[in-house]
Image: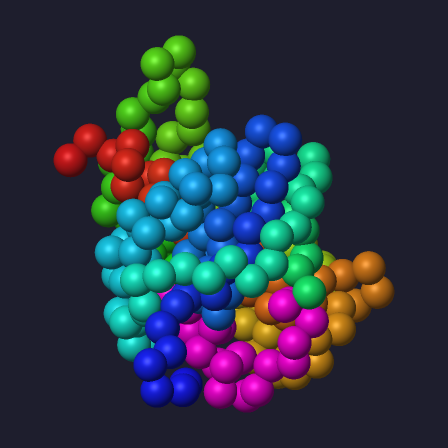
Amino acid sequence: MARGAVRTVTVVVEAGTRRVFADALGWPGWCRSAKDEDAALEALAGYRPRYAVVAERAGVAFRPARRFDVVERLPGNATTDFGAPGAVAAADSRPLTAAEARRQVALLTAAWGELDRLAVEAPETLRKGPRGGGRDRDAVVAHVVGAEQSYARMVGVRHKEPAPGDTAAVAALRHDIAAALTAARSGDPMRERGWPARYALRRMTWHVLDHVWEIEDKSDT
């Protein structure tokens, strides 16, 4: 970095008609949404301490700059408005070095660890919304595992969906996902009509952490 340059966190913004995501590139899972770009960036900043917990578990130094630099703005789609970052960015086509792949996979693995921790420590019954909606702990965990089995196919990993409570099957699925992403170098999709590794990492880690933080927020502690 040139002397006097301002340190920033590079961010991609994905804007749908009802929801906007701000996603910190290089920090898979540090991604929040709101009704507009400014609010999404504010939410991203607000989750810095919560993401730091994940980075610490991963053994990854997390001392990001306080300023955000939006380097790409993407049109959203139905997935965006449904509630997930669904657009692949041009930045996702960058190759991965071995060190960067290991670092980002460590963050995904730490997110899985946080979910596993809450699957034991969080109350079985979670606080419901004002109209009584929302899933309880075990249903949230099962939803995440089911999504991972689907996401795995996008990086060339095929497993049957683990049965509820089958920790060995979950571990095997995650092992193969992590191995595929650790070995990834190219910025090309990892299979035909699949995802590039960088997008897969940020999408998968976001999904795990979104539900980790949901469980934390809805736990009666």
The magenta segment:
91-110
Does 111 sit left or right of 89 as displayed? left
- Quadrant of residue 63 within the rendered picture: bottom left
Residue 188, horizontal then vertical, whole percent:
75, 73
Does 177 sit left or right of 11 as displayed? right
- Quadrant of residue 18 within the rendered picture: top right
Q: Quadrant of the C terminus?
A: top left
Residue 195, horizontal then vertical, whole percent:
71, 62
Q: Is residue 11 magenta?
A: no
Residue at point 60% right, 58% down?
72
Residue 133, horizontal then vertical, whole percent:
43, 18
Residue 181, horizontal then vertical, whole percent:
60, 74
Residue at point 45% right, 52% down?
31
Residue 2 appears in the picture as rendered? yes
Q: Main secondary structure of the magenta part?
A: helix
Residue at point 44% right, 78% down?
103
* In the depicted structure, whether residue 15 falls above or below residue 87: above
Residue 159 appears in the picture as rendered? no
Q: Nearer the viewer, residue 159 or 112?
A: 112
Q: Which colour scheme appears in the figure?
A: rainbow
- Quadrant of residue 54 within the rendered picture: bottom left
Q: Quadrant of the N terminus?
A: bottom left
